[in-house]
Structure formats: C-alpha cells, structure tokens
Image (tube, rainbow, N blue to C red):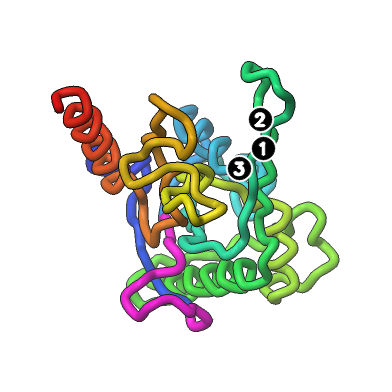
Amino acid sequence: PFSSPAGFDVLAFMKTRSSDLPSDYPDVELMFKTVSLDKSTTNKQLQYLGLQDILQNSSLLVDPNDDTLSIVVLLMSPKSRGRVWLSSSNPFDKPRMDPNFFDHPHDLKTVIEGIQLGIRMGESRSLAKYGPQIDRTPIAGCEHLIFGSDEYWRCSIRQQGSALGHQCGTCKMGPKSDPGAVVNPELQVHGVKNLRVADASILPGPLAGHPNAALFMVGEKVSDSIKEYWNG
C-alpha cells in the first residue's frame, strides 16, 4: 500500500556513537518489516532483500505461519567509494562497475552499531512484552564465530551485505577545476555539447536520507534550464 514505504512498516533514522557527521545528521536507517513465509508476495520481497534463504533456514520458524520482524540496517553516509568505467570503446557495451563496499573500516563499524541499535530496540519495553526471540541461526561462513560478537557481525555483513539502490555520484556536479566533476550547475557535461545528465549520479555524494525528493528537484531544475535555453 502507498501508506507503507516499499512495504516496510516502520523506518527509523538514527545516529550511532561513532558518527562523525553533524549533530542532526543520521548515519544509519533501520527498516522494520513484519513477514510471514507463507505469502508469495512476501517471498519476492525477501528475495529482493537477500533474506529468504536466511529465514527459510531459521531454527526458530517451525511453522510457516509464524511471524517475524526483520530489521534491515542501511548505511546512510558510506565513506567507501566505488567506481564505474568503460569496458571498451563500443558505446553499446555495458560499463564495468566496482561498488567497493566496506572498503573503509568505518563503514563496517557503523553498520555493526546499527545492528546493535536494532537489537536494543527489540529489547525495549514496547517490544519485549511480545516475547521476541533473536534468530541465532548462524550465517553461512560465520559458524565458527561467537554469535553477537563484533567479529560475527563483521563476517555476516560481508557475507550478506548488499545495496538497496540509491547509488549516486558517478557523474558528480562541480566546476571544471574539480577533476572528479562531470557536469556543471546546469547539468551539462563538461566539454560535450548538447548533453546533460539528470539523475542521482550528479549528486556529489550520498544523502543522509532517501534521495527521492532531491531527485524530483533535479528533474525540475534541468527542465527549467532546458526551457530557458531554448526560449532565450
């Protein structure tokens, strides 16, 4: 339903103790989703999140009608940087991409703290009255580590971590003097005539939130610029 963002019941924007962002900037988002494994639509969502195999192998879910509360931790302002480059001189060939997830150690530390925030919320008075149990089924490849330790979470993040979308910054907006800039403030590609870029790639870096509203503004901005250019 439209009242639930992407099918999630609750979104929480929070700040971890190790954050070096300004005081009013969150560095993690917790996305809460209640699911039941007997629903085909739910299974599709679980596949998208990479959670289906984990829940299917869970030692807690003996009944497919059992409900679960999944907490997805999103890193809002990653310090790691990936790259996109041409695979050949053929413009129809797909580019090559390296997201370079968790290259910076601070990103892993932040996600671990986000997981711990989610666990503490599950232990809060509001949720504890429902008697929730944490699924301790070990993530494949991390069975040798103590469940709940930083080492375990670090391993599970590397095994199961993925992107939910909203990648940005590959066509960064900036002045010509910036070697990393691709477009100017009018979203025109430096050194190329009659070519503009108008999507999340022009953002200089990730936002501390969902970029949808900002990208609507990008579309409005470029449409105004194009009309102004042609109308004189």
Q: Tell me if residue 202 comes above or below residue 193 in the rendering.
A: below
- Quick check: marks 1 and 2 in contact, CB under 8 Å? yes
In the image: residue 11, left or right of residue 68: left
Write the start and end of the magenta stretch as one range: 17-31
Mark 3 vs 2, N-terminal side: 3
> Would you identify the image quadrant in which residue 41 lies?
top left
| Predominant secondary structure, magenta span | loop
In the image: residue 193, left or right of residue 85: left
Residue 168 shows in the view = no
* Disc 1 target residue: 85
- Residue 161 vs residue 138, the one in the foreground: 161
- Quick check: marks 3 and 1 in contact, CB under 8 Å? no
* Image quadrant containing the N terminus: top left
- From the top left corner, tell me how far across and down residue 15 is, in percent: 42, 74
In this rendering, the label closer to the viewer, 3 or 2: 2
- Residue 10 vs residue 98, the one in the foreground: 98
Helix, strand or loop at mark 1: strand
Residue at the spot 70% in from the left edge and 61% down from the top edge: 103
* Disc 3 target residue: 50
Q: Tell me if residue 209 comes above or below residue 196 in the rendering.
A: below
Residue at the spot 53% in from the left edge and 81% down from the top edge: 18
